[in-house]
Image (spheres, rainbow, N blue to C red):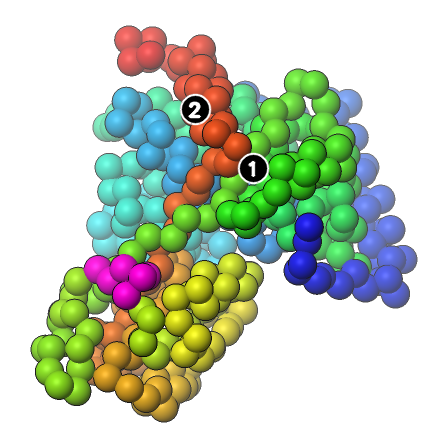
Amino acid sequence: MNEHFFKIHKWLYPVSWLYGTAVIIRNKLFDWGFLRSKSFDVPVISVGNLAVGGTGKTPHTEYLIKLLHDKYQVAVLSRGYKRRTQGYVLATPQSTAKTIGDEPYQMYTKFPSVTLAVDENRCHGIEKLLALKEPVVDIVLLDDAFQHRYVKPGLSILLTDYHRLFCDDTLLPAGRLRELVSGKNRAQIVIVTKCPQDIKPIDFNIITKRLNLYPYQQLFFSSFRYGSLQPVFQQGVKETAANVIPAGKDISLSSLTDTNILLVTGIASPTPILERLEDCTKQIETLSFSDHHDFTHKDMQQIKERFKRLTGKKRLIITTEKDATRLVNHQGLDEELKPFIYALPIEIEILQNQQDKFNQHIIDYVRKNTRNRSLS
């Protein structure tokens, strides 16, 4: 079922035990009421995970935005990881990945009608969003807030990577779990993410049993669906005998057969993207950086040199939507490279013909809890 390998550092178990003890005490203080969780009078949906690293939180949050933003005024609140600002920051057209973080900036550029803010203090952030007079916020989506227990969301969605289920993992630093597996009990919905498109029915059954959820919890499975490549910069390259890349246009993945690609990523797990591109062409060079990597001028030079080594008339630099937010305003990026840089968009597909059921579950929660009943 699971061909991806991950390592647990058993020699770090004593440190994990100490860490786990602290986490247990903290959670018990919330459970017993010594530390207070605050509820709000609007629907608050949390999207998070038990582990560090990428489980697809941003694409799933974007899925919820698409589902809800036509009918409700949606606000997204994120921590804004690795931004160069502090405290509450409301996204504006002048915001960048440096001021609000790469993932929030990605969502804001894709959904400019959505109210988006970042704040390490989620309670304070929600209060600031609800105090806005224009627009009046109907729903708050919390990005990566499962462990932020000072907020009590009305609906918690917990994600777990198909290739690294939380039931197979262990606590930091030996493993990648932020808290004990029992933390899953706070979620009303659990989604197994990054499932292969050819996942077998028996795998659904095996995973369902292994996750051992309670009757009040809904389980769904999702997969990434990749769209056509989109130019990060709109200036085009003239189509000549030496260059046959379309000028500033979307490029379908099916047309990449004879294209030489440099895949540049700064995400937690680039393997699914690489595997998808390998279905289209075998001529792929990779340049991988750590998650949320802050690209340097040296990195820009390395990208340029690696791209120049590619042969053939059709050459592309492909990156993720998240990485594109950190490249688009980088002063060290060579102007000559910009027309060749394309981002690979990712969307979420709910598997097992359960998409309508999932959507209805979300919509029903929002309708029952929205303060603007005329919109429900």
Residue 42 visible in rendering: no
Helix, strand, or loop for circle 1?
strand
Give the residue at x 67% y 59%: 3
Amino acid type indicated by mark 2: Asp
Give the total of numbered labels: 2
Q: What residue is disc 2 on?
A: 356
324 and 224: which is toward the camera: 224
Is residue 355 positioned above or below 12 on the image? above
On-image quarter of the C terminus = top left
| x and y, in percent, of residue 123 in the image | 51, 32
Span colored in magenta: 250-255
| x and y, in percent, of residue 321 in the image | 36, 58
Give the residue at x 47% y 17%: 365
Give the residue at x 11% y 77%: 239
Is residue 368 positioned above or below 324 on the image? above
- Check residue 139 for magenta coloring: no
For the residues marked 2 and 1, what is the alpha-carbon distance in whole angstroms? 13 Å
Q: Residues within 10 Å of mark 2 (few under 14, many from 20)?
A: few
The quarter of the displayed image where residue 154 is located: top right
Q: Disc 2 vs disc 1: Cβ atoms closer than 8 Å?
A: no
Is residue 368 positioned above or below 196 on the image? above
Q: Residues within 10 Å of mark 1 (few under 14, many from 20)?
A: many
Which comes before the other along the chain, label 2 or label 1? 1
- Disc assigned to residue 221: 1
Amino acid type indicated by mark 1: Phe
Helix, strand, or loop for circle 2?
helix
- Disc assigned to residue 310: none
Give the residue at x 83% y 54%: 16
Residue 293 visible in rendering: yes
| x and y, in percent, of residue 219 in the image | 61, 29
